[in-house]
Image (spheres, rainbow, N blue to C red):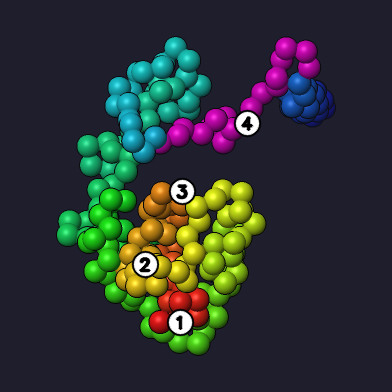
Amino acid sequence: MKIKYSIYVIALAGLSFGLASCGASGDHPGYEYAPQMYNSVAYEPLSQIQNEQEGSWLSSREDGKGEFFNSNINNPHGMNMREPVEGTVPRTKDGSLPYRLKAFELEEAAKNQNPIELTDQVLAEGKVLYTQYCSTCHGQNGEGDGKAGERVGGVANLKGGAYIDLPEGHIFHVIMKGKGRMGAHGSQISQERIWKIVHYVKQEIQKQ
């Protein structure tokens, strides 16, 4: 009987402690179960600290290492980022090679040909993209009379002068890298979409 009573007392005490530890009040934040789930170790991709004792004065880590230690022990040399496979070439999300030409390399860019096959669907998509990204300045018909273009001034009339004879690679490069008052759009529009805009400009606006 005494044993049974003792078990009840211990169980009740344990339950009371458990409920009390879950609460937070005043300056006491309560106890954390599995603190690593709350304070995960971040692996910095461009820097790493290999000294396992770095930040030990601050550490609450379960593995006993310093708070600032962040090397990935499973990778060669404790690196956080793996090196690319030798001989591989990075590509963008749409499968294109990164565009390497600088803003001033217009002559080299003009030699590039449009890799997107010209179809009715491509022209339709190019029109939508032109309306979204270009018509605000260049106008719906490419005459430089868009609402923003009126305020900015100096917007190219794509139907006039030397603009008619610009190579596709030149137009693509200017959209990607910008020129004069026109800012670069390469960070906003994928290469594939820019080439579709180029098709639309040449075929529908300039009637080439």
- CA gap between label 4 and label 3 equals 57 Å
Q: Disc number at residue 33?
A: 4
Pointers 3 and 2 in contact (C-beta within 8 Å):
no
- CA gap between label 3 and label 1 equals 25 Å
Q: Amino acid at mark 1?
A: Lys
Q: Residue at x 50, y 87 (%)?
A: 120
Residue 55 on image: x %, y %: 41, 17
Q: Disc number at residue 125?
A: none
Local packing at callout 2 (Cα closer than 10 Å; few below 14, some 14-19, many 20+) is few
The local secondary structure at tag 4 comes to loop
Q: Residue at x 30, y 22 (%)?
A: 51
Q: Looking at the picture, tell me which residue is in the foreground, 208 or 119.
A: 208
Is 46 magenta? The answer is no
Q: Which residue is mark 2?
A: 162
Q: Looking at the picture, tell me which residue is in the foreground, 117 or 110.
A: 110
Q: Residue at x 48, y 15 (%)?
A: 58
State which tag comes first along the sequence, 4 or 3.
4
